[in-house]
Image: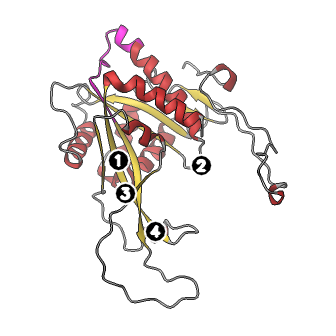
Amino acid sequence: MAKRKQDPEELPDAPESRGKGKKNDDESDSDEDMDMVNVDFEWFDPNPAVDFHGLKTLLRQLLDVDNQLFDISELADLILSQPLLGSTVKVDGSETDPYAFLTVLNLETHKDKKVIRDLHAYLSKKAPSLLPAAPAQIGLILTERFINMPHEIVPPMYTMLMEEIQWAVEEKEPYAFTHYLVLSKAYSEVASNLPAVGQPPSKKKKAGKAEEETFYFHPEDEVLHQHATGHTTFDYDTPVDEGASDSKRAFQEMGVRPQGHLTLIEAGRFAGAVDAVKSFLNEQ
């Protein structure tokens, strides 16, 4: 299996290595004893012999509570069946589980696969006015990473994906897309059902429903919006317990309600979108 470039210096868009103990000038004295962990990220082709279980974990995270509606094993196998398209990111060599991945699936070519039929029907139901009708060739971009991964790992994955798609098209493979559909995750904040520490439970007040603000787990989604034909956020189908939002609350007053998110980009605007993502994330 072909190995990706490993060294950040060899990959122009890769994040720079951060040495242990390196701090910003404006850090307070109280942070002097905090150590920075030096991690070298490596990019690899998807490896069927190694990545199956790691991909399943990331796919479950991407699809959240609705992951049980799909055959995640079949989806992981499908991703691994095209090992020269897409990337994984690892930290301890090619034989370890991926910490992030990005790939694209042709919804038309794979329409005979049950998991793709299920996904297409699900996404069409969630965004009936967003998905283009036939004969559009839609490339479904699936990407996910562990929550503590640096955003700078994303631009190289998109850059390599564009190169691989170009090579595949030159070889007459079915990746001449008219549109790209990016599946991602968002969340909204909801009022907690739990009383504040030291405070008795208060009676619920009736009030007009305020418009919810949407936040994005992947900050590049907001950049992609600027180049998109359209985008939408949707609720998951699987019911969750009443306290689920509070279970995701950490050191804040509001609970968190995860949602799915879709962004549709015409193929002719995709390169510009990727360039914008690179500029945005490399400045973070």
- To which residue does mark 3 refer? 65
Q: Residues within 10 Å of mark 2 (few under 14, many from 20)?
A: few
Sequence-wise, the earlier of marks 4 and 2 is 2
Sequence-wise, the earlier of marks 2 and 1 is 2
Which of the two discs, 2 and 3, sits closer to the camera? Answer: 2
- Identify residue type, mark 1: His
Of residues 257 and 98, the one nearer the viewer is 257
Report whether 114 appears left or right of 142.
left
Sequence-wise, the earlier of marks 2 and 3 is 3
Q: Residues within 10 Å of mark 4 (few under 14, many from 20)?
A: many
Image quarter in which the C terminus is found: top right
Q: Residues within 10 Å of mark 3 (few under 14, many from 20)?
A: some
Q: Where, by quadrant of the figure, is residue 137 drawn? A: top left
- To which residue does mark 4 refer? 255
Residue 98 lies, in percent from the top left, at 55, 38
Q: Which residues are magenta?
A: 167-181
Sequence-wise, the earlier of marks 3 and 1 is 3
| In the image, residue 219 above or below residue 190 | above
Sequence-wise, the earlier of marks 4 and 3 is 3
- To which residue does mark 1 refer? 261
**Circle on res. 148:** 2
